[in-house]
Amino acid sequence: MTAPNTETFLDLDSPELYINRELSWLEFNHRVLEEAQDPTHPLLERVKFLCIVSSNLDEFFEIRVAGIKQQIQNKTSDFGPDGLSSLQIFQGIRQRTLKLVEDQYRTWNEELLPTLVKQGIRFFKMEELEPECYAWLKDFFHEEIFPVLTPLAIDPAHPFPQLLNKSLNIIVMLEKPDNPDELRYAIVQVPRALSRLVAFPGDSPACHHFVFLSRLITHFISTLFPGSTVLGAWAFRVTRNSDLYIDDEEAQNLLSSIEEELLNRNKGAAVRLEVEYDCPGEVINYLLKVFELQEDDLYLANGSINLLRLMPICELDINPKLKDAPFTPCNPLPFAVGKTPFQSIFSHDILIHHPYESFSAVTELLEYAAEDPKVLAIKMTLYRTSGDSPVVKALINASHRGKQVTVLVELRARFDEANNIAWARRMEDAGIHVVYGLVGYKTHCKTLLIVRRDEDRIRHYAHLGTGNYHSKTARFYTDLGLFTVNPDIANEVAVLFNTLTGMSDYPGFNKLLIAPFDLANKSIELILAEADAARKGKPAYIFAKMNSLVDSATIKALYEASQAGVKVDLLIRGICCLRPGVPGVSDNIQVLSIVDRFLEHSRIFYFENSGNPKAYAGSADWMPRNLFRRIEAVFPIEDPQITGRIKDEIIDTYLKDTVKARVLNSDGSYMRKNTPKGQQPLRSQMFFIERSQKDNALPPTKISQTQKLTVVPSPKLH
């Protein structure tokens, strides 16, 4: 990436002002790799980051690269805001990914692997084994692995087999004794049911010795081909296009259409071939031809293919110093003082900061609502949740107890489609009314509404969040959740549910910002209002935190605000297409990225608003897909105390991070943020951990059934 010219841009559509989204994403994955290279992390946490790099690359090729290759094949001439053609983007991806993969394997081979050995965690090649260990593994192969293997010959009677997406396979080169001039190939699929790491007894209980399953199979692979000479065997893996092709207008039954398409995901067009680095060129060319790929689609692995398979060692029960110190989220104070959840929410709005404050506040509210005879109905959106979700269990319990339960399930949550279908059917079997969202849009908003008959009237209790209702990911995703009975907000949540389930026209809201209807326009209005305030000499400032910033219209508005003199701080974890630091355009904009122990997932928006600050949070990034192709909800923070907490505690702490924060340069590269002279380094996530443990030290108080049914007098609502 290169920085634009330093002239003042009057044309804010100039391609030089926009960073390509795919190359920006690769820079993000490089920042993840930097965490694997960071010696201040415990060793197994570094291995975990290395695994995440591989997982991220898999999805990137399955979805983004697959789409770009289709554009090239279809000769699509559309150009993005950055002005790059599909071919130029692909070439840029190729160049950057080669370097990323090289750095990844160098980190593994030269940094992590030797350090693991010092801790008694070793990965052996078969020729390195002592005789007794070799004998043990030989017996293990014949007893546990050989019966599961199926050699697949390739000849005129046996065509090349259909290999599943990301499955690990071994290609074998064979020579027949009766015809040594004729070389033949065969495929051995590495069974997915078996662990990719084979542990075997070490010298002492403190040792953890492993052999990669593919290397064990390769070593004994001749046993699968009696009568033939094995000339060589090499592991490889093919990545396929995994995007689902669902035409909502044509699909009469969305659920069955997605189920059918899921079966095709493993058979999509090949987009990447990974092969062991020592595989001969003639074998590689054969595989490229079989999968209809070019040399630019080939990536050589200087080690085990798919480093994600190292993740099990991160769970080893060994020296605790090799992992992050255990962290238990604290029960939020408002829910820990003996009140019922409804009493707590009724008293005042409550903001929860995950994972520092426990997600149990949400699950306990649902579990309580399921039991409370005064609760009449529960309405909820579910985008992702865990298989054994306490959320789903509470909803089913509520239905069994006669509550009216309605759940909007998004079946197209990428790579969670099968899970979502499974528990959607469980809920339907329990009598829950399951709705699959609006035609043409993913339901991505995070909203919960409980309708309760209080002593004075029927009241709406609402929860709105930035993250999924997923109790497991809530332990390592940073998110915000707001509980409120503020009728200005809660009543709009009720109307939103009616709009989505009743397929009604969008009525327009005064408080909530809803995509695809008005979120984009209202966000830009908020940005331009700051620009107008700055021109009039009034206080003006913008802070926005999200996963990705891509939408060009929003970026242009931020450029205009910067030109008007507005200070803009952006905290963008992943993709950022805005180019900061361009004189006359974005020199008032700072872009930071934080990659750390927890995944930064919350979306926070703060506007100084001429001295009367406005704060929002929600489910949407400033990306075209979120603004125009999804149902998203961004909600205001009405309580001045919570607004102050967001600004003074959360935003300011993020901006002071000098340990894990990186600054985006105008050329698209990132650099570590330096600690100012005389100041102590600050790591924002560690600050939040320490703060939550200090401020929320009170243990939760058990609530008796008598207390649960008590209703407090109506306070003033904020």
Image (cartoon, rainbow, N blue to C red):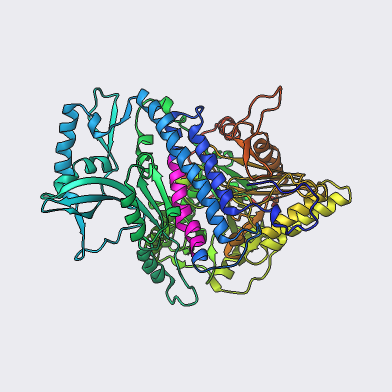
The percent coordinates of residue 50 (x first, y second) are: 44, 39
Mark count: 0
Residue 425 in percent (x, y) is at: 38, 64
- Taking the spot 57% from the left edge, 57% from the top edge, the residue there is 88
Front residue of 62 and 330:
62
Give the image location of residue 279, x and y in percent. 32, 45
- Where is 684 relative to 183, above or below? above
Q: Which of 259 and 125 lies nearest the eye of the viewer?
A: 125
Report whether 70 appears left or right of 256. right
Residue 445 against residue 234 in the figure, above or below = below
* Quadrant in the picture for residue 394: bottom left
Residue 64 in the magenta stretch? The answer is yes
Image quadrant assignment for residue 109: top left
Q: Which residues are magenta?
A: 51-70
Q: Is residue 679 magenta?
A: no
Q: Residue 156, percent across and down?
A: 21, 65
Q: Name the residue: 21% across, 46% down.
A: 231
Q: In front here: 486 or 501?
A: 501
